[in-house]
Image (tube, rainbow, N blue to C red):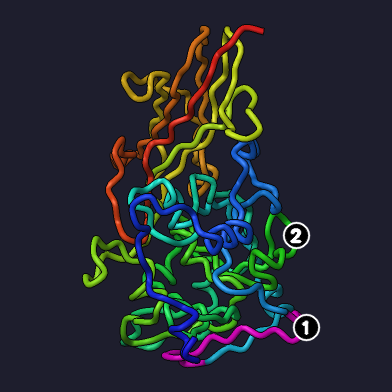
Amino acid sequence: MDGSLQSVSGPGRVADPGEGISTQELALAARNHGLPLEGLRYDVTPPGLHYVLVHYDIPAVDATGWELTVDGLVRTPLALDIAALRSYPAVTHRVTMECAGNGRALLSPRPVSQPWLVEAVGTAEWTGVPLRILLDEAGVEPGAVEAVFTGADHGVERGVEQDYRRSLPLDVALGDFPEVLVAYAMNGEPLPPQHGYPIRLVVPGWYGMAQVKWLREVTVVDAPFTGFQQSVAYRIRQSADEPGEPVTRIAPRALMAPPGFPDFMSRHRVVRPGLVALEGRAWSGWAPVERVEVSTDGGGTWTDADVGRQARHPWAWAGWRVLWTATPGSYVLAVRATDVDGRTQPLEQPWNRGGFANNLVQRVPVLCVSP
């Protein structure tokens, strides 16, 4: 090593043909766990099953001294401790959150990063203060265009030392549908350390990179934020030298809860002949899910599933269910979601260098055997 940050933190890259998962990627996978898909049975995901993505370290936090500042282009800067935040009227939203890289490991060639399959998702009830209330109290000045959010997690990425920072356009930060939260509770309890204790941002409908954890600063600015996590990472690009498009809202996706029972090593599913309930969850960050289709022949033919309504929780996943008459043999089950604006899942996944917003139709190999 030459003593520079670049010697321990290389550029983003795509795996070479035939290159297997590295020990570094395995270490990331051990730190950042996904939702066991049988956890799709829960309307609200228990915190220990909800997916986790931590870019750097979980910070050591002393909540008694924690302070959130709201400053920049505001008339009255704010400095709020946890008690002050809790003094505002509490709001709770049920929100499905998904990592922007969900499905990355299924792409070919594989972008080298956290090797998600399809499990990087969860739904929780987040309680806190609407961000717009804090920004209104601070008084946003004319000319402001974005709010920048700084977390307490600090590290190096692609040779750049940084705090984790992201921004939102001001109309999103001030909006009431979706209503962005400064959250201090998850499923009615204080945030777990890995989920941002003592406070975090929750941006319904947006991929997880927007949900800044261990939140300590909100800064209103008069120009688009160009920090690493905004302008370098989380861009959909085909080549390393193009600016790409920003990752924002969650693309439609449906997942199937694993039917039957698994082989320990391969996780291949086994079912018995007869009626088998196929069920799972579907969501979109753009609009409510309108339709879920299920295939038992790998996508050759499709059957509509019954889909639950999302009116009470428009930013949370919907349940779906269909009955399948299984007969002995091998099958590939598939499921796809379509939202009310017509966005649907592809059967063949467009590729990008970061492996972002990959919502390829899920396929589940199943063997049906008699007892």
Q: Viewed as shown, does residue 16 lie left or right of 262? A: left
Q: Around disc 1, counting alpha carbons within 10 Å, would you say few (fewer than 14), some (14 to 19), or many (20 or more)?
A: few
Q: Which residues are magenta?
A: 61-76
SS assignment at label 2: strand
Question: Which residue is at the front of the view, 246 or 106?
Answer: 106
Task: Check the image and report above or below for 285 versus 129.
Answer: above
Residue kind at label 2, given as amino acid type: Glu
Disc 1: which residue: 64
Q: Viewed as shown, does residue 25 lie left or right of 104? A: right
Provide residue 335's location: percent of width, then percent of height.
Answer: 42, 30
Disc 2: which residue: 189
Task: Check the image and report above or below for 21 versus 166.
Answer: above
Residue found at the far left of this picture: 242
- The stretch drawn in magenta includes residue 71: yes
Question: Which residue is at the front of the view, 247 or 146?
Answer: 247
Provide residue 179's location: percent of width, then percent of height.
Answer: 49, 62
